[in-house]
Amino acid sequence: MTAVTNAPESASTPTVDELVRTHLPLVGHLVRELLGRVPSHVNRDDLISAGMLALTVSAQGFDASRGVPFGRFAAFRIRGALTDELRTMDWASRAVRGKAREIEAVRNQLAATLGRTPSRDEVANTMGVAAHELDAVDADVQRAAVLSIQGLTENNGAELLPDHEAGPEGILMHREQLGILRDAIAELPERLCTVVREYFFEQRKMADIAADLGVTESRVSQLRSEALAMLRTGMRAQDGDAAPAPAPTSRRRDSAREAYCAAIAARSTLAGRLEASTLLGEARLVAPLRQRVAN
């Protein structure tokens, strides 16, 4: 038991108000001590209220002539009040909890003896009860378990709630990005567009794509890498972000890149880009790309 520091006794008998004010920190100390041993969903304010009431009752019933310091006397009463408060929070009866502790003790003893987790029948035989009685006790304990959203996470359950950042503006920006991606894929050279469509959207194997195009799988992999590089360049150009400085290339390749970015920008308006997704921001890119390839 943690030792409690008692307030110094005055020459005259202290009043009830003086005893309560002087020993207010005692309630907080005992509540903190208890919270370290109970589930995180236990409400601290409820325990504080029960402890404060017990402190006041202790001050009213304190008799200094008995020779017991008030701090020790109040600590005993406050601990009892906190225990009673915990019992009122528990949905399981004391009989169920006692039976559950008995079963757990038998399980631990058998596990230490057998060197493994005991079966339900072994526990029941050791206790001299039927197996269905163990199931009934376990079911009662499970029904009494109370979960709290605040007790599940470190941030009071905020991350379990819907993301408030994905508001109308965020959804609109996401939809525009999908539309730009659709346009960027559609403006790829025909062979690169085919590889992207079939590999990423239709989930086809490289070997099958290679067979259709009459090339090797290695060549399909190269085409995919080339397409992704062009898509990154095109997307960055539409966002206005500065792309990393490319390696020195020929003037012809630089011109082709500029023409590709310009084609993406001119391909559709904002309204046209929003058609690449639903109102909730779900992509629907495959059909337009199939239509583009067919044309």
Image (cartoon, rainbow, N blue to C red):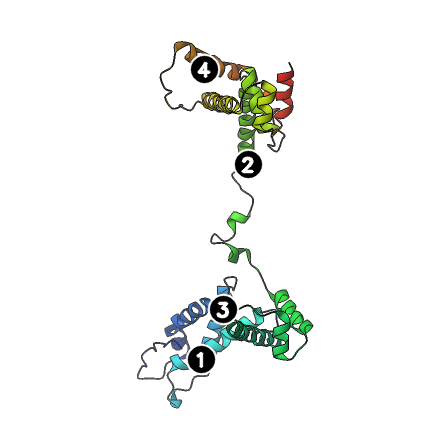
Q: Nearer the viewer, residue 195 or 20?
A: 195
Residue 280, position in %: x, y? 61, 33
Give the mark nearest the N terminus, 2 or 3: 3
Q: Which residue is mark 1?
A: 76
Image x and y of residue 33, in percent: 42, 70
Residue 49 image offset from top left, x and y in percent: 49, 69
Q: Which secondary structure, mark 1?
A: helix
Give the number of the mark in front: 4 or 1: 4
**What residue type is disc 4 on?**
Arg
Q: Secondary structure at mark 4?
A: helix
Any part of residue 271 in sight: no
The amino acid type of the residue labelled 1 equals Phe
Q: Name the outermost residue toward the bottom.
A: 66
Residue at 54% in and 32% down? 169
Which residue position is annotated with label 2?
167
Rendered image quadrant of residue 249? top left
Give the mark nearest the N terminus, 1 or 3. 3
Disc with the residue nearer the chain's start (2 vs 1): 1
Can you tell which quarter of the image residue 194 is in? Answer: top right
For the residues labelled 4 and 2, say whether their Cβ atoms are less than 8 Å apart. Answer: no
Crowding at dot 2, Cα within 10 Å, few <14 / some 14-19 / many 20+, comes out as: few
Per the model, the C-alpha gap separating discs 4 and 2 is 35 Å
Q: Quadrant of the N terminus?
A: bottom left
Residue that carries the numbered disc 3 in the rendered image = 47
Which three-letter amino acid code belongs to the residue tagged 2?
Answer: Gly
Which residue corresponds to mark 4? 257
Relative depth, front residue between 84 and 264: 264
Q: Residue at x 68, y 76 (%)?
A: 130
Cα distance in 3D space between marks 4 and 1: 81 Å
Q: Residue at x 61, y 78 (%)?
A: 126
Calculate the distance from the C-alpha at mark 4 to the C-alpha at mark 3.
69 Å
| Quarter-of-image position of residue 99 | bottom right
